[in-house]
Image (cartoon, helix red, strand yellow):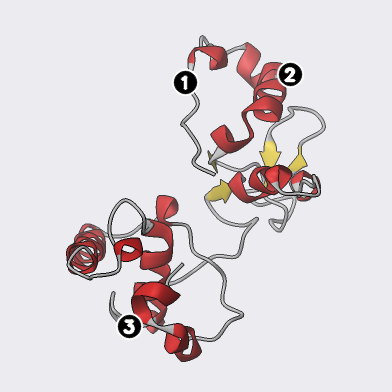
Amino acid sequence: HTNQCYGRDHSKAFGLNRPVLCSGTIVGTRTGINRFLSVLVYEFHANNQKPNKQCRSPDTTDQWTMNYLYYSGRFGKISKTETLPWGTGPVNTVGKPCIDNRQKPNHSAKDIVQFDSETGLILNNYETEDSLARIAPVVHQYDRCIAWALKMLHEAEFFKTVNYRVEDLDPLPWKT
């Protein structure tokens, strides 16, 4: 996604084996988030001036632009930030396992998502049993897998006690 905007060699600066960071789960101090948003918005404005239409909004994505900026050090010193591996921490992003279900041949990585056998809630795979984050405090992108997410949410004992109807939520449109 970033080759057309930044060239083929841009990824050599940070290596190919780095995790893809999710721009929907950024957490930080007020100063840090202000800096993050300022750099990201500036980059979108700069990309919108490029002759290649794929570099401009809405064709370019915040996800890939943010990853480019992060790994090229444009947000500041990488040593002063922390990334958490998937399946740990305060946010569990489940969109990728669901999206793989749309690929051909039909395959889902849904098997990497773990559910608590008693509550039906989504677990962080790599948190220990005694961790406060073992049950994922926040599940991000569940709307990408609305079919099995709704089933899971309906069956979860926790949600049976909450005055909340999941089916009243409108899933976000997904551009394929």
In this orientation, does residue 104 appear?
A: yes
Q: CA distance from mark 2 to mark 3?
A: 44 Å
In the image, taking residue 10 as reference, residue 19 lies left or right, namely right
Query: Can you say whether 171 is above or below 141 in the image?
Result: above
Rendered location of residue 132, percent (x, y): 60, 47
Rendered location of residue 34, percent (x, y): 19, 60
In the image, taking residue 1 as reference, residue 99 lies left or right, namely right
Query: Can you say whether 9 is above or below 51 in the image?
Result: below
The disc at residue 5 is none
Rendered location of residue 57, percent (x, y): 28, 54
Q: Which one is nearer the viewer's eye here, 131 or 55?
A: 55
* Category of crowding for the residue at label 2, using alpha-carbon neighbours closer than 10 angstroms: few (below 14), some (14–19), many (at least 20): some
* Category of crowding for the residue at label 1, using alpha-carbon neighbours closer than 10 angstroms: few (below 14), some (14–19), many (at least 20): few
The disc at residue 77 is 3
Q: CA distance from mark 1 to mark 3?
A: 39 Å
Q: Which one is nearer the viewer's eye here, 115 or 47?
A: 47
Element marked by disc 1:
loop
* Category of crowding for the residue at label 3, using alpha-carbon neighbours closer than 10 angstroms: few (below 14), some (14–19), many (at least 20): few
Name the residue located 35 percent from the left edge and 62 percent from the top edge. Answer: 54
Mark 1 sits on what residue? 170
Amino acid on which the number 2 mark rests in the picture: Glu
Number of numbered discs overlaid on the protein picture: 3
In the image, taking residue 45 as reference, residue 29 lies left or right, namely right
**Considering the image in quadrants, where does the C terminus appear?**
top right
Mark 2 vs 1, N-terminal side: 2
Mark 2 sits on what residue? 155
In this orientation, does residue 81 appear?
A: no
Name the residue located 58 percent from the left edge and 48 percent from the top edge. Answer: 92
